[in-house]
Amino acid sequence: MSTIREMTIEDYEKSFLLWSQIEGLVLSDADSKPNIESYLHRNKGFCFVCEAEDKIIGTILAGHDGRRGFIYHLAVNPNYRKQSIGQRLVDSSLSQLRELGIEKCHIFVLENNDVGHSFWTAAGWEKRSGFFVYSKTP
């Protein structure tokens, strides 16, 4: 039996281990413990973990900019997939966003992440086109 609860910084090491094992999930300096702690503080109530057998088997980071929600690091241990864990995590975050009146949410999926594309498509998310994402390190 798995349980979903709000993520805390005490979950960082186990979450980072899971993220590092997920194909298609790219980690960067933005995923350092201090940065994740800051993210959790700014987005309290939107980030969750799923636990089973005393280990973290799923995560989701979510937040908003006041008008749109954003999801990062939805990850489920491959040994626990096909049990609706990913959908339960997404539903938990979206529910919290809706309570604030945030009615649209985005996720960025790498072009070659076939598992991610399959999940989001099956979950009814619409693939957007017509724009590019630009990034810059300040």
Image (cartoon, grey):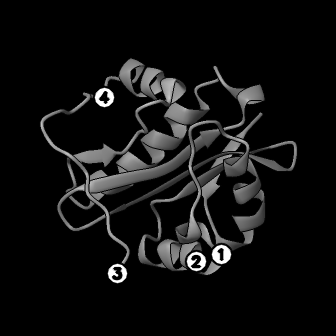
| Residue on which the image places disc 1 | 33
Decide which of 105, 25 is in the foreground and name it.
Answer: 25
Q: Is residue 103 above or below residue 138?
A: above
Q: Point out the frontmost of discs 3 and 2.
A: 3
Name, please, the residue furthest toward the right.
53
Q: Give the amino acid at mark 3.
A: Pro
Residue at disc 3, secondary structure: loop
Alpha-carbon neighbours of circle 3 within 10 Å: few (<14), some, or many (≥20)? few
Decide which of 55, 116 is in the foreground and name it.
Answer: 116
Q: CA distance from mark 3 to mark 2?
A: 20 Å
User: Which numbered marker is on residue 125?
Assistant: 4
**In x, y percent, where is residue 97?**
32, 55
Q: Please state if 92 lies on the left or on the right of 2 as rendered.
A: left
Q: CA distance from mark 4 to mark 2?
A: 28 Å
Q: Point out the frontmost of discs 1 and 3.
A: 3
Decide which of 103, 25 is in the foreground and name it.
Answer: 25
Q: CA distance from mark 3 to mark 4?
A: 31 Å
| Residue on which the image places disc 2 | 37
Q: Give the amino acid at mark 1.
A: Lys
Q: Earlier in the sequence, mark 1 or mark 3?
A: 1
Q: Please state if 48 lies on the left or on the right of 117 as rendered.
A: right
Q: Please state if 108 lies on the left or on the right of 33 as rendered.
A: left
Q: Give the amino acid at mark 2.
A: Glu
**In x, y percent, where is residue 123?**
39, 24
**In x, y percent, where is residue 19?**
67, 50
Residue at disc 4, secondary structure: loop
Which quadrant: the C terminus? bottom left
| Residue on which the image places disc 3 | 138
